[in-house]
Image (tube, grey):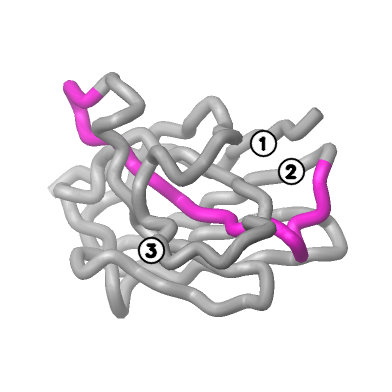
Amino acid sequence: QVQLVESGGGSVQAGGSLRLSCVGSGFNSSTYYMAWFRAAPGEERKMERKGVAVISPDGITTYGDSVQGRFTISKDSASNTLHLQMNNVKPEDTAVYYCAAEPLPRVKYGGSWFYWYEYNYWGQGTQVTVSS
C-alpha cells in the first residue's frame, strides 16, 4: 500500500534554512500529484491543513503566496522522494509539515491540488519550529 514518511524537521532561527524529505513507497511518483501541507499550532484537524507547495506528475510546481520565492518543492522519481527546501524561514512558518500524494485522475480534473480533500495519502508529519 501507499506509505509516506517525512523527515528533516527541527528547530531553526528566522532567516535560516531547512530541507524536508518524504520517502514514498507502494506507488510510482511519476503518476501522482504530490504536495506539502502544513498545520499551525492548534490546528489539529486534517481539514485545517493548508497547502504549501504542489508538484504535478510531470514536474510542474505551484506555491502558496506566503512561501513563494522562499520554498522550493522537488522530487526524485527514481527514489520516490519528495523534498521541500525552505529558505529564509519566518516564525510564521512554524507548523507540522505533511507530505501528501494522490494518483493522477483518470478523468479530467480542474482542481488546484492545494486542498486537503484532494489527497487520500498522507505522511505522519514532521515538526518545524522557527524562532525569532
36 magenta-colored: yes
Find the magenta span and give its range.
27-43
Q: Height in image: 24 above or below 64?
A: above
**Distance between the alpha carbons at the discs numbered 2 and 3:** 22 Å
**Residue type highlighted by circle 1:** Leu
Residue 113 rendering spot, x and y as whole percentages: 43, 58
Residue labelled with disc 1: 4
**Residue type highlighted by circle 2:** Gly
Residue 84 rendering spot, x and y as whole percentages: 50, 59
Between circles 3 and 1, the one closer to the viewer is 3
**Distance between the alpha carbons at the discs numbered 2 and 1:** 5 Å
- Residue 117 got which mark? none
Asked whether disc 2 touches disc 3, contact meaning CB atoms under 8 Å apart, the reply is no
Asked whether disc 2 touches disc 1, contact meaning CB atoms under 8 Å apart, the reply is yes
**Residue type highlighted by circle 3:** Ser
Residue labelled with disc 2: 24
Q: Residue at x 58, y 69 (%)?
A: 56
Q: Residue at x 54, y 26 (%)?
A: 124
Pointer 3: residues within 10 angstroms few (<14), some, or many (20+)?
few
Residue at disc 1, secondary structure: strand
